[in-house]
Image: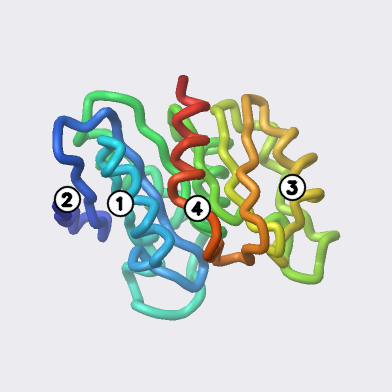
Amino acid sequence: MKTSEIPAIAGVVHEPDGPPAGAVALTHGAGGSRESPMLTAVCDEWARRGWLAVRYNLPYRRRRPKGPPSGSQAVDRAGILEAVAAVRALVHGPVIAGGHSYGGRLTSMAVADDGLALEVLTLFSYPLHPPGKPERVRTEHLPRITVPTVFTHGTSDPFGTIDELRPAAALVAATTEIVEITGARHDLGSKKLDVPALAVDAALRLLD
């Protein structure tokens, strides 16, 4: 399996062995980067399934290598539109996009409000609310999402319980699936479950 770079979007491309069935674009959480072990593992899994997969940095991470998001969310959302367009140009076929935590949330907002067109939206550890503050829910835009959506979520995630996630996912105006990762926290680490395979399986089910 080969990798290559897309410098314009600070992207790493995981290339399948043959002609790609489609493309996937994934980005990172608030404290992370494209080097996230989870993003790398998920992109490897997509490439094994015959898809071209790209993990890329959001604009704030392109500006500085560490630290939390800085600047405007609108700029980061514009970076998502740019990245998905660059990835779409590489293939003839469906395009799936999403990301971990902050990156997934902003991708979902780009789908809801910025005209980002996808075949499937894939969200890892969607941050329903800040830890310990369940009253500050981040669901206002979800009813405006009209593409099939996968939520891959740990049962011990402090950013939202599975019981909180179910009614939130039901707000999406399309088919949804929740992939429960038993015992996992926000990083989706699991010694018992193959998280990348489960997430990819769910996205492919929603694509059919």
Q: Earlier in the sequence, mark 2 or mark 4?
A: 2
Q: Name the residue located 33 percent from the left edge and 43 percent from the top edge.
A: 46
Label 4 SS: helix
Structural distance between the alpha carbons of marks 4 and 1 = 12 Å
In this view, the residue in front, 25 or 186, is 186
- As drawn, the label of residue 1 is 2
Label 3 SS: helix
- As drawn, the label of residue 195 is 4
Q: How many residues crowd around disc 2 within 10 Å: few (fewer than 14), some, or many (20 or more)?
A: few
Tell me the amino acid under the disc marked 1: Asp
Q: Earlier in the sequence, mark 2 or mark 1?
A: 2
Residue 166 visible within the image: yes
**Marks 2,4: beta carbons within 8 A:** no
Mark 2 vs mark 3: in front: 2
Q: Name the residue located 17 percent from the left edge and 50 percent from the top edge.
A: 1
Q: Position of residue 68 (x, y in %)?
A: 51, 75
In this view, the residue in front, 182 or 11, is 182
The relative height of residue 194 versus residue 29 in the rendered view (above or below) is: above
Structural distance between the alpha carbons of marks 1 and 3 = 27 Å
Residue 115 visible within the image: no
Label 2 SS: loop
- As drawn, the label of residue 57 is none
Q: How many residues crowd around disc 3 within 10 Å: few (fewer than 14), some, or many (20 or more)?
A: some
Q: Position of residue 2 (x, y in %)?
A: 14, 52
Q: Name the residue located 52 percent from the left edge and 65 percent from the top edge.
A: 191
Q: Position of residue 187 (x, y in %)?
A: 55, 66
Label 1 SS: helix
Tell me the amino acid under the disc marked 3: Leu
**Marks 2,1: beta carbons within 8 A:** yes
